[in-house]
């Protein structure tokens, strides 16, 4: 891949889907696939696939198609999931617990190292074998455990302040579930996840299908 080449965010957003399809192909024993066959499975055009993958040097060979395992590994490297990312969860409520209990994140290299909350009643409790810690231990834990990602599953009223706190502790990546913009310095990457926005898009599609 060419160094410093800016890849469009639209392409980056499509890569996890390629990765998932290629993983399924590997599981079913497929070793190579043409962009045409991949396009039929993924319901995108073959030219889109070729264009997307050309951003990274192509990986395909004329008349051969793509080596599925190779392409899968390369996209994994581009997505940075060929290595481990230490992560903590702040907010041990319904959503925080669901994330900790979902073991597939770890299979992708996202290792949940700790869970934090400010409710003293939760002190000493554990979720999926991980102890819930109190907020006064947060900064120290981040430094000692090489934490890269913080998931915020706290109420929106608290999210801005806690976002600032973790940024001050050196965190550069926040997976934000609280329904608010965090307004942090540009070097802190914030990935907002809002299920309700996804539902609203679904609702829009339903409304427009029947109108
Ligand atoms: P919850 O009330 O079950 O859990 C929130 C937890 O955060 C509680 O354990 C509470 O003690 C803790 N907390 C509150 N203030 C804190 C602080 N300053 N520091 C540390 N911990 C603190 O709520 P639930 O259902 O788990 O939702 C959590 C957040 O995620 C809410 O903001 C909710 O709106 C949001 N949410 C977002 C979704 C999305 O798609 N983005 C989906 C579901 C919930």
Image (spheres, rainbow, N blue to C red):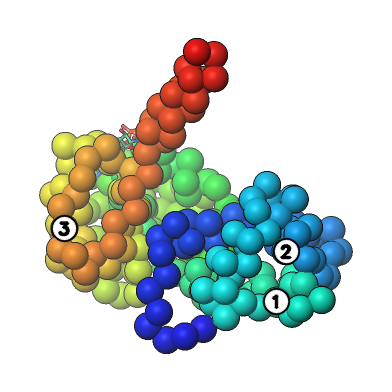
Is there any visible trace of residue 151 in the rendered image? yes
**What secondary structure is found at the residue carrying circle 3?**
loop
Question: Crowdedness of circle 3 by 10 Å Cα count: few (<14), some, many (20+)?
Answer: some
Sequence-first tag of 1 and 2: 2
Q: Residue at x 42, y 70 (%)?
A: 7
Q: Which mark is residue 184?
A: 3
Q: Is residue 148 left or right of residue 120?
A: right
* Quadrant position of residue 61: bottom right
Q: Residue furthest bottom?
A: 3
Q: Residue at x 84, y 64 (%)?
A: 30
- Count of picture labels: 3
- Residue beneath label 2, please? 35
Percent coordinates x, y for residue 26 in the rendering: 78, 64
Residue sitting nearer the eye, 113 or 2: 2
Percent coordinates x, y for residue 128 in the rendering: 52, 49
Q: Is mark 3 within 8 Å of ligand 1?
A: no
- Examine the rendered structure and indicate whether residue 195 appears above or below residue 66: above
Q: Residue at x 28, y 46 (%)?
A: 117
Are circles 1 and 2 on residues that touch, CB within 8 Å? yes
Residue sitting nearer the eye, 91 or 51: 51
Q: Is mark 1 within 8 Å of ligand 1?
A: no
Percent coordinates x, y for residue 57 in the rendering: 57, 80
Q: Which mark is residue 60?
A: 1
- Examine the rendered structure and indicate whether residue 184 appears above or below residue 199: below
User: CA gap, disc 1 to disc 2?
Assistant: 8 Å
**What secondary structure is found at the residue carrying circle 1?**
strand
Is there any visible trace of residue 162 in the rendered image? no
Q: Nearer the viewer, mark 1 or mark 3?
A: 1
């Amino acid at each position: 891949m060419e160094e410093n080449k800016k890849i469009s965010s639209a392409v980056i957003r499509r890569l996890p889907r390629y990765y998932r399809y290629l993983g399924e192909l590997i599981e079913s024993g497929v070793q190579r696939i043409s962009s045409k066959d991949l396009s039929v499975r993924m319901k995108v055009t073959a030219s889109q696939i070729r264009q997307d993958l050309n951003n990274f040097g192509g990986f395909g060979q004329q008349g051969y198609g793509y080596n599925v395992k190779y392409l899968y590994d390369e996209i994994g490297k581009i997505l940075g999931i060929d290595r481990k990312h230490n992560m903590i969860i702040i907010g041990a409520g319904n959503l925080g617990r669901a994330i900790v209990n979902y073991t597939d994140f770890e299979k992708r290299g996202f290792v949940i190292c700790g869970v934090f909350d400010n409710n003293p009643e939760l002190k000493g409790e554990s979720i999926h074998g991980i102890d819930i810690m109190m907020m006064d231990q947060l900064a120290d834990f981040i430094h000692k455990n090489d934490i890269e990602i913080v998931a915020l599953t706290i109420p929106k009223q608290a999210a801005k302040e806690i976002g600032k706190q973790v940024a001050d502790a050196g965190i550069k990546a926040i997976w934000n579930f609280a329904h608010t913009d965090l307004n942090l310095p540009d070097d802190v990457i914030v990935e907002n996840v809002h299920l309700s926005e996804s539902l609203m898009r679904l609702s829009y599609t339903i409304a427009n299908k029947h109108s």
